[in-house]
Amino acid sequence: MASYGYDDYDGRGQQAAPPTQDPAYDPNFVSDSVKTFVVHLYRHIRERNVYEIHQMYEGSFQRLCERMFRESPWPAVEAIAPYVDNDHVFCLLYRELWFRHLYARLSPTAKQRVESWDNYCSLFSVVLHGVVNMQLPNQWLWDMVDEFVYQFQSYCQYRAKLKNKTEEELQLLRQYDQAWNVYGVLNYLQALVEKSLIIQILEREKEGLEQFTATDGYDYEGGSNVLKVLGYYSMIGLLRVHCLLGDYQTGLKCLAPIDISQQGLYSIVIGSHITAIYHYGFANMMLRRYAEAIREFNKILLYILKTKQYHQKSPQYDQILKKNEQMYALLAICLSLCPQAKLVDENVNNQLREKYSEKMVRMQRYDDEAYALYDELFSYACPKFITPSAPIFEEPLANYNQDAYRLQLKLFLYEVKQQQLLSGVRSFLKLYSTISIGKLAAYMEVDEPTLRTILMTYKHKTHTVDNHGKIVSNADLDFYINEASEMQNRLKIE
Amino acid sequence: MGRERESPNQQQQVSYTVEELVAVNPYNPDILPDLENYVNEQVSSQTYSLDANLCLLRLYQFEPERMSLQIIVRILVKALMALPASDFNLCLFLIPERVVWCSNLCQLFFVRQQMEEQIKTLIVLSHYLETARFRQFWDEAAKYRSILEVVPGFEQAIQSHAIHVLSLTYQRVPRPILAEAINIEGLSLDKFLEYHVANSGWVLEKGQGRTQLIALPSNEFNHPELKKNTADSVPLDHVTKIFPVLG
């Protein structure tokens, strides 16, 4: 089977990245523009000037990266610390940016991965223990959670490729076995959710007792937004981590406090909006709740279609486009398994046809080629699944970075196979309002008992159970079998 | 470096129920033994908690060396009994295929092989149920009484799933088809029908020839006209209202 698209490339330009050790790089050299940058950023943070912080974060930082740090890291934190009163929290924030830039443009060494983990631990501990009174832009806070989960995923992939690791790298993996430990990652995210009381805040907001969404999470009475908003975005972070682990049910549960039928903090930052809906839709697809997945993919794809041009200059633009393409592939899968075109807006549908109409026709066939297409689209569009357990250092060392992906793919294709006869029965049912079982069986070239199992499979597969135990129909066609006394067995289609 | 993980919820009191433990400690390896005991308790008391079992599978996934295949088999049987919900698949998503075993466990190889066979059997049984092939399911299940009979209520659970699927599909179901789906025949079936006529609103009718028909209670799935008239599609202006263009 093709495994097209599922490689280790993560769309962040890491693959062809030059090594970190640029001989001309002097970690202690601080140019005037960097000095001005840190001094101003530090001042704006102290003055709680969110607007200016946001301008510097989204604007100046990116411009400096482009101009001066295309292929080398930013100056070491020790070198800039004197310009910012050696401020502990500012240095943690600077290091967070430092590593993020390193991951995006260069490739981190084993040591740097561990150091970045330590920096997150320090940063989150400071936030969790409530000693900050900063206000940071939502974009930045989202990026922190997003990057934290990304680096965790990246570490799991890195760790799982044991072949070709140098002795030194293996030694580091053994020595720092707590770095990016799955319990640690989950417990930090969970602690941010709990300590921030964000779930209670959202509840109280529904009753009109508290404002959060209305102020975009900012605190205009002198408090800090950092813990609250990090807690909020951590719910999306948890959804993503659980999807990476194949735990779709738990992932959806983590997102549940956020009402995605409404606008919220998740939707004012495009990256968070896409991450939430992509994983929400994917999890629903794996739970066979195709109609729900189609509805949400449709909404976000329409939104991206209409707003794409406003994001062209955003540093996240490539990521937006990539997720956009992946969600079209997922939409093609969902619609092939659950042909409810009426749920899809015309503009989205036109895009989908352009990209996948030919493949979608072939996916209806359920031959080997159709499976290969399901495989291809799934592999292209699925999250980068991870194996969370620690490596086994026994010889011979083996790579296991694809194990988790292969398991999810296999189970997904298994589901596709179980539904293989449904598209055939659909195409006949569409043509009739009433038909006898015998006649339909003859058309489908199966015997009557087999037809009955196909019809029951159709009903079973198109009716799912929601979290409250209620039966929800995803059916595109309704029918029932009525075995009346004097007539032939009638299958009535509504 | 490599600091201790942050465990904000370490308090663990005897008075906590297992459900509460899971809610408060979703990512705490210390509750693993409690969760294993709880699986056995669910088996013996005919209760069920998907959340607790998923939590246990998650801990196994994080630390495969602590994995008990026997417990996994029990979780999977219970998940099969939760049909039509897709709990069985939810569990499979979390069970790594290649369970890496430490060398000191190698002597358990035969036990392990047996357990893996059992998991494969359960996957086959699930496949028959997922594709509504009840005859094959009951035939196959009969061969594996040793796995299934240790879990009380298994037969009844699958029977009610079969009835659920029948009632989605049929307004009137011929007796032989019902008999095959629930694996009950003859006098036992008569008794079974009598019970459901009295308690679940089933009606027995005479069909063509000597075939008995069972009219199942109407629901919105076998009587589409009962479906509430909800708008299925999202109107476009609704979408644009939710997501105004960012400036």
Image (cartoon, coloured by chain):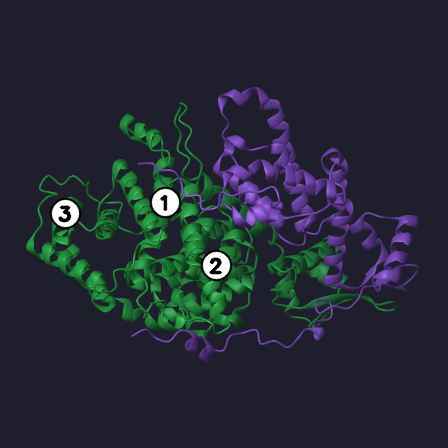
Determine which residue is flagged by label 2: A255
Specify the farthest residue to the left: A32
Question: What colour denotes chain A?
Answer: green
Amino acid type of disc 3?
A: Pro
Mark toward the viewer: 1 or 3: 3
Cα separation, mark 3 vs mark 2, equals 38 Å
Pointer 2 local density, CA inside 10 Å: few below 14, some 14–19, many at least 20: many
Check residue A152 in the rendering and tell me which mark sits there, or answer none. Answer: 1
Q: Which label's residue is closer to the chain start, 2 or 1?
A: 1
Pointer 3 local density, CA inside 10 Å: few below 14, some 14–19, many at least 20: some
Determine which residue is flagged by label 3: A75
Amino acid type of disc 2?
A: Leu
Chain in purple, by letter, is B
Q: Is residue A66 above or below residue B66?
A: below
Give the letter of the chain under mark 3.
A
Dot 3 and dot 2 within a common chain: yes
